[in-house]
Image (tube, rainbow, N blue to C red):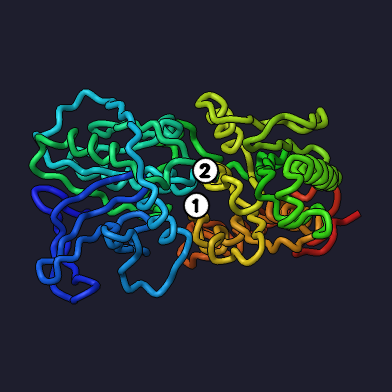
Amino acid sequence: MIRLKPFVDININCPKCAAAVQPNKWLITGMHSMCGITCPSCGNIMYMELPVNSGLFYPGILDAATGERCDHLPMNNWYLSGLVTAFKNRGSEEVKIEVIGSTVLGAKPVLLLNTIDATYGHALYQLLNADYYLQQKEYDLVILIQRSMLWLAPEGAAQLWVADISFGQGDKWFDALAENIELLLSGINDVFLCRSFQQADSNDFNIERYTKIAPFPLEEWNVRLVKPTVTFIWRTDRFWRRTLPKLIDNRITRKLFPGLLNTARNYFQFRWILKFSAAVRKEIPDIDFAIAGMDKRTPPLPDWIKDYRYPVHEDHTAREQAKRYAESHMVLGCNGSSLLLPGCMAGGVLDIVPGDQWAVSAGTFPFRITSIGDTHFRYVMLPCEITIERLVAVLVSVLRDRAYVEIQTSPPWREHKADLDNFAWSRYRQAAFQLSEHFSSDKGMISVSRSK
């Protein structure tokens, strides 16, 4: 955590003259948590991103006079360029904050957790940091949260400060928000900003505290294979396959015919998904299969596919989707398709990685950690070039063969001191083998084919 009051406890060097500088104020303008700096040596006035959330990686510094970066970071990416844009376009529009909670602040030092972001997944991960800070009983935790995330707010915080800021506005610079936050904390002497991580450690949070829904019971994986449950997350603007040739779908035509191209693109995406769904059903006749995502329910899905598509966020439909994820052995979709919460709730994830986003995908998995081997088996990254046949084969293998992986990688099956009888391994292996009866073929099994 970083002390904000009675002083900002960060020491840096002026990027222009290298003199030692201490911030003289702090302000939270949205997703950006900033401090103000005036160099006593050269007089330069600056704003620096405090090292929390994405600011841990990118503590950019802006020249207050020009709005341009004056730090010495060696990169320029979406976050740093976004900071420059936000500052140059800062507005005076009002941002209301609704205070929820009966605790009167001031008896304890205050911890402020800023979860505002321009991306749903980032906001969720920042919120998941709350578990750690809720354990710090000598502090009162205040969570700054966007209204659309309020249904996920955990119990136990002293207060929730609900800001009416959409994800589309989360990267903007709101002076009014900073002023309102400062006013709410005006009578508090000791205030700290939570050093939240952009990817919260899976060991540090209990997802049920946020969703109020128990995640998929991994211990029931095998018995639930009587009816394997799979959910595909479809986001039309993040589809990993090119469904139209470049001659038709390119930078120029997207400007000239955006509506027509979107309609055509969605049509061919839908055909691909139906083809994939049919191939899955062929291999798993009794599958419980669903399509989820933020989209209209058009075109309609076949009767055997459950539809969890909703065009806009509403708390009750978000809960419906979370319950579905918690029923799912596996969720799958393209990275960027809001896989984070499903990954926390389901038994595992197949993440289809678009383009060169391999590192981004690996850094956003919400692991439900068991043994190394089993965890690795349940969370899979796949290249976007994958065919339907291969995607189905991987999905079937994870569902069907997890028990085999468990006996090879997980306790108690490879513990020398395991209190098991001599034939426990054989019985479990035979039981695992019988799981193939729920699938149309044993193709891909690490075993001899079933006896005829």
x and y, in percent, of residue 125 in the image: 42, 48
Query: Pointer 2: what residue?
Result: 341
x and y, in percent, of residue 346 in the image: 57, 43
x and y, in percent, of residue 387 in the image: 80, 59
Q: Is residue 107 left or right of residue 376?
A: left
Image quarter (top left, top right, bottom left or bottom right) of the C terminus: bottom right
Q: Earlier in the sequence, mark 1 or mark 2?
A: 2
Q: In this view, does 258 lie to the left or right of 368?
A: right
Image quarter (top left, top right, bottom left or bottom right) of the N terminus: bottom left
x and y, in percent, of residue 442 in the image: 82, 56
The one nearer the camera, 76 or 365, is 76
User: Under tag 1, what secondary structure?
Assistant: loop
Q: Which residue is drawn at 21% across and 23% down?
A: 102
Circles 1 and 2, Cβ within 8 Å, touching? The answer is yes
Q: Is residue 129 left or right of residue 287?
A: left
Residue lying furthest front? 65
The one nearer the camera, 360 or 29, is 29
The numbered mark at residue 176 is none
Q: Which residue is drawn at 69% across and 44% down?
A: 236
Quarter location, residue 331: top right
Q: Residue at x 73, y 31 (%)?
A: 306
- Distance from Cα at disc 1 to Cα at disc 2: 8 Å
Query: Pointer 1: what residue?
Result: 366
Quarter location, residue 123: top left
